[in-house]
């Protein structure tokens, strides 16, 4: 890997974390889509593997419908498909990222939707929902979890990474309120890990699993 490539991927990550609006975030990803997987592989991007490993503790493989929120180029579907999950639905705010996800031909259904807005799915449509690398600075707001709870079946699990400005008390306060309101129960959490261990910066994160009531 050249020094130039290394600088480019660090710059892309910094640009997207500094995004000031949902439109700006989607535009950055549209422009990044073709290089995204190469850049993320170069920094040892670990969220999809962490989220998939956690999902496997709670959701058996098979044809129950799963939702991949903020699917990006579809790295999660590649992993989950190989693990034996056969009905994966996905959405993302970036048409450029979705175009690449579509080309994998793994997703049952892909839509351009945005966390933080109403999601065009039935209530309780999914047996489980995952979101890898989406709930972080410059990306989806935590309130997007309300719609993920709505579209996930009671007894189903939502498994997602939390990073940067949400990590720690911001997410804990948000999650505890939802637990007190009877919306979900916390089942599991990883310890904090560096999601880009081969990158220049440490990007600490945690993966959580919640069961929907
Ligand atoms: C770091 S990438 C993760 C993509 C994929 N889940 C993965 O792990 O490779 C973040 C993705 O979240 C999407 N995204 C950011 N904000 C979003 C929002 N509010 N609603 C839906 N997708 C969003 C971006 O377009 C991008 O594809």
Image: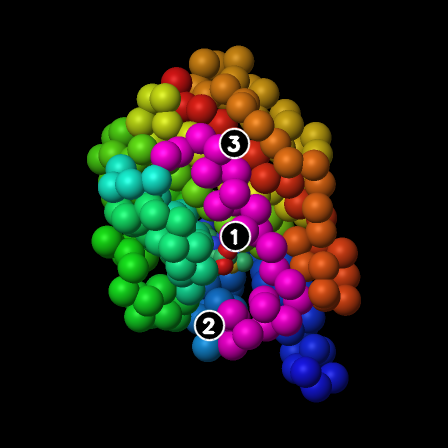
Q: Is mark 1 within 8 Å of ligand 1?
A: yes
Q: Confirm whether residue 71 shows in the render.
A: no
The C terminus - image quarter? top left
| Residue 152 drawn at (x, y percent) | 34, 31
Q: Are marks 2 and 1 in contact (CB under 8 Å)?
A: no
Within-10-Å neighbours for mark 1: few <14, some 14–19, many 20+? many
Most foreground residue, 183 or 45: 45
Helix or strand or loop: what does disc 1 sit on? helix
Among numbered discs 3 and 2, the one appearing first in the sequence: 2
Which residue sits at x=65%, y=78%? 8
Residue span colored magenta: 35-60
Number of numbered tags placed on the structure image = 3
Which residue sits at x=46%, y=77%? 34
Helix or strand or loop: what does disc 3 sit on? strand
Q: Which residue corresponds to mark 2?
A: 33
Question: Is 103 above or below relative to 182?
Answer: below
Residue 48: mark in rendering = 1
| Residue 81 drawn at (x, y percent) | 35, 53
The N terminus - image quarter? bottom right
From mark 3 to mark 1, how far is it between C-alphas? 14 Å
From mark 3 to mark 2, how far is it between C-alphas? 28 Å
Most foreground residue, 73 or 48: 48
């Amino acid at each position: 890997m050249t020094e130039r490539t290394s600088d480019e991927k660090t710059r892309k990550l910094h640009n997207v974390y500094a995004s000031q609006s949902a439109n700006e975030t989607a535009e950055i990803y549209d422009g990044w889509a073709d290089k995204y997987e190469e850049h993320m592989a170069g920094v040892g991007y670990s969220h999809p593997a962490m989220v998939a490993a956690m999902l496997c503790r709670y959701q058996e493989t098979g044809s129950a419908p799963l939702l991949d929120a903020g699917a990006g180029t579809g790295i999660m579907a590649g992993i989950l498909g190989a693990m034996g999950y056969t009905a994966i639905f996905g959405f993302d705010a970036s048409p450029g990222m979705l175009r690449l996800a579509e080309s994998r031909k793994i997703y049952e259904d892909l839509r351009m939707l945005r966390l933080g807005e109403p999601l065009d799915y039935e209530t309780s449509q999914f047996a489980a929902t995952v979101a890898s690398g989406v709930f972080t600075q410059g990306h989806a707001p935590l309130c997007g979890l309300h719609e993920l709870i709505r579209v996930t079946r009671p007894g189903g699990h939502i498994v997602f990474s939390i990073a940067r400005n949400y990590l720690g008390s911001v997410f804990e306060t948000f999650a505890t309120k939802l637990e007190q309101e009877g919306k979900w129960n916390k089942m599991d959490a990883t310890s904090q890990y560096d999601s880009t261990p081969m990158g220049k910066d440490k990007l600490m994160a945690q993966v959580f699993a919640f069961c929907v009531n």
